[in-house]
Amino acid sequence: MADPVKTHWHTVKSSQVRDELAAPVAGLSSAEVEQRLAVHGRNELQTKGRDPWYLVFLRQFRSPMILFLLLAAVITMLLQEWFDTIVILFTLTLNAIIGFWQERKADSDVRALQQLNTTEATVVRAEGTERIDAAVLVPGDTVKLESGDKVPADLRLVDANGLQIDESMLTGESLPSSKRDTLVAANTPMGDRVNMCFSGTLVVSGRATALVVATGTNTELGEISELVQGDGAKTPLEILTDRLEKFIGGAVIGIASLLFIASILIGTAVSEAFRTTVALIVSAMPEALPIVLSVAMGVGVSRMAKHNAVVRKLQSVETLGSTTIIGSDKTGTLTVNRMTVEQLWTPDGNVHSFDKSGVAPAAGSSSATATPSPLTDLQRSALRTGALANEAAHKPGDEDDTDALFGDAVDVAMASVAVQAGALSEAERSSQAVAEMPYEPELAYSQAVYLEGDEYVLHVKGAPETIAGFCEFLATADGAVPFDRRTVDRANAEMADQGLRVIATASATLDAADFEALRGRSLPQPRGLTLTGLQGMMDPPRPGVQQAIADCRSAGIHVMMITGDHPATAHAIGKRLGLAGGLEPLTGAQMSELGDLELIDRLRRTSVAARMSPQDKLRIVKVLQGVDQTVAITGDGVNDAPALKAASIGVAMGESGTDVARESADVVLTDDNFVTIVEAVRQGRVTFASIRKATFFLLSNAIAALLAVAVNTFTDLPLIFLPAMLLLMNVVTNGIQDIALSFEKGEGDELTQRPRPKSEGVLDGTMWLRTAITGIWMGVGTLIVYRLAHSSGLPIEHARTLALITMVMFNFFQVFNARSERQSLFTLNPFGNPLLLISAIVALVLQWGATVWPVSANLIGLHPLSFNEWMFCTAVGATVLVLVEIDKFIRRRLAARSL
């Protein structure tokens, strides 16, 4: 038997395929099936199982900051500083729980979306024809297909009768593909291999007999599934935070080491120098940063969930906000994946537009006049013919729902529009024809005869050029006039230029005697018809997508359509949606002839890529990422899965999307709406802004504490802060307020800002400078207060408490500075973030409680302060507010002058 993996089955005759696969006409025997199952395995795809809960939990401890904190916990344990150890471990555990809960919840949500039905197949075996589980099919099996079946494996057709397959999940084409036993060239794209049926696609109409040529991972579907196995790349936020955490950890440990050596050299006891070093590490390490990152992204996840987006990984929330390019599939993502009649032309020159897409309908012909509702008798007659020469049928139990029709996409569109427009009733549409001939791709038309009153009426629809050959008259409001081919061709061309698929309708009244003579015989080729109209249809854009793309453009994001559909169709949809780019669509065949540099240049000048295979989409993602673009890919089909996996962030459709696409994605849209992405982009930018603000707050405080401890070491004063004091401030005070910053709702201009440069860190140059200036200011202010307290003869516990509360008050005002990067604090609603206001007050109360409660005061080394001392610390702390307001004012003035 030939190797089913390597043979190009579409290039050889079906009889040769049968010989190569050793497939008897009567079917394989049970013994032969068992042997082939042992060789080829079950007809199933290998999917990645759910990670054990403990691995998900341990993944939360991978970041450099977490590792540094674990080291700090070990050191404090060795020093028997149990309180410090407990606080650090509590911080680590809380962060891990937040990340673990979100990751498991998102995974469960996505798995709940998966379809759990088992595919069955009708197979011819030596023992007879039976319906079996498709998983036990083997190469060489003979399979029967009929309307409604899911193709169970890759098949080579032996015989086909009116077979049409919906291959949109693989190719992105919205129209079914007509199949027949005809040889095609070896280099024919998958979507044009008319003699092949591919696993996972759907039989729309017709029936066929075919041979199984590939199963499981050897199918086209299996090859795509293999491309998406393995872990995806790190998100931009993961890269930035890893870099920031390594920088912080390295800087803190480096400075601490130098401080330890310097302390020894100036004569400090080793034990005291070590204790000072530990205090320095604890003070400068922002323990709350991992929690803040998790909470900020968790808040983003919750907000996105309210807008029908399930986020599978926390870090993916921010990635959409930093996206520079969105590459979207067309069918089912930008469009509704349902053919819809949009225009009706009638021979009197009128064009009626049906607006069902939510965007402005395509303009009518230059010679036509827009026809308002209600429909004319002539228009109603054209729609009626399209609905009667039609094989669309209702799904069982949905007989009254015109949206529940199934069958050929063109038939469904024409039947639906006729019933919804009132051209005929559902009962009339469902009535039995007295004679009919289904649509055959080779003939390009269908026809049916109905008894209407006491007359037999023939209704015909099909390709305009075919139907025109059968017509002798044109229908007008004043009666039939001689057929004018030029008028019809012009109307057809104008519709086709708009990307519409055009179907002509025609009818004729038959002589009763002639029709009776045809009973029991096939309908002959029609003649003497009267053309009633042309119907233009397409798979229309989803409602709101046009505005969503415009919003993305305002946000500095380039939207591209990357589809497997025909270039003309893709170009027409691109024009409807306002996609930028003056060039014709880039095709997969053209792309194969371009090097990477040439491809990048072409992608910069076009926004539509058509006839793309999964490998082509994957290449586009990788070359764009190679020039530092942050690429988001959206899609719903199996053909989108490799690109979804490789992209900086993959966004899959949850309702109509395939399991492979959902498993490959980072975000799943439960409403299948591209418009949701715009809100996700905004929320991603809000999330990053929250992280940036929180990082500014934490790092400025860390610099202040680091400076205070380090400078104090080289003075004659005792240690300014004990480790427990710094932990109390970092976790109880900073941590609570920092977490509250995660709930900021944004400044309102997120979608007018350009995407953040990839080279830019969590903090940009402005924020780094502000962080350094305020950090130094707070550190120096705290040292001055400590020096004054010690000089006045206060006990060491009292002096340390004054220094600590001064630092706490600096933090109190600094957290409100962090609410906005550019706007003055005094222009913001003070109750805009009630959680922050409450947490700041609660943090002060907790600090006050820690100083007055004897148990905590003795444990941490604190001393109660008087009212005047609290007011003094508050006045000193408020100076950082003045400093930042001056900085914001200067920057606003400079920005205004540059306009």
Image: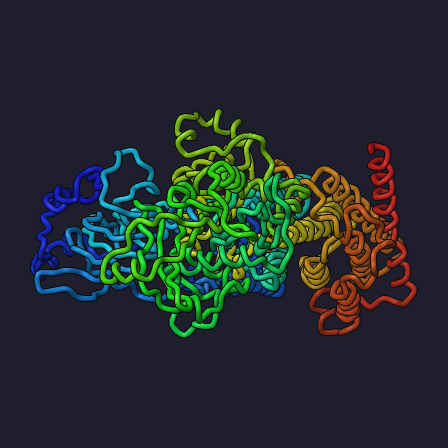
From the viewer's perspective, is 566 left or right of 252?
Answer: left
| Quadrant housing the C terminus | top right
From the viewer's perspective, is 3 left or right of 715?
Answer: left
Which residue appears at 30% of the width and 55% of the height?
Answer: 45
Q: Is residue 845 above or below residue 791?
A: below
Of the pair 85 and 292, the residue shown nearer to us: 292
| Quadrant housing the N terminus | top left
Q: Is residue 771 above or below residue 88?
A: above
Indicate how the structure is coloured in the image.
Answer: rainbow
How many numbered circles does the render carry?
0
Q: Residue pushed farthest right?
A: 868
From the viewer's perspective, is 609 left or right of 8?
Answer: right
Q: Is residue 611 above or below residue 319?
A: above
Of the pair 694 and 449, the residue shown nearer to us: 449
Provide residue 111's location: percent of width, then percent of height. 43, 64
Of the pair 458 and 215, the residue shown nearer to us: 458
Of the pair 247 and 5, the residue shown nearer to us: 5
Provide residue 162's location: percent of width, then percent of height. 28, 52
- Residue 441 visible within the image: yes
Provide residue 306's location: percent of width, then percent of height. 61, 64
Which residue appears at 63% of the width and 61% of the height?
Answer: 303
Provide residue 278's location: percent of width, then percent of height. 63, 52
Which residue appears at 79% of the width and 66% of the height?
Answer: 841
Which residue appears at 82% of the width and 36% of the height?
Answer: 895
- Residue 276 visible within the image: no
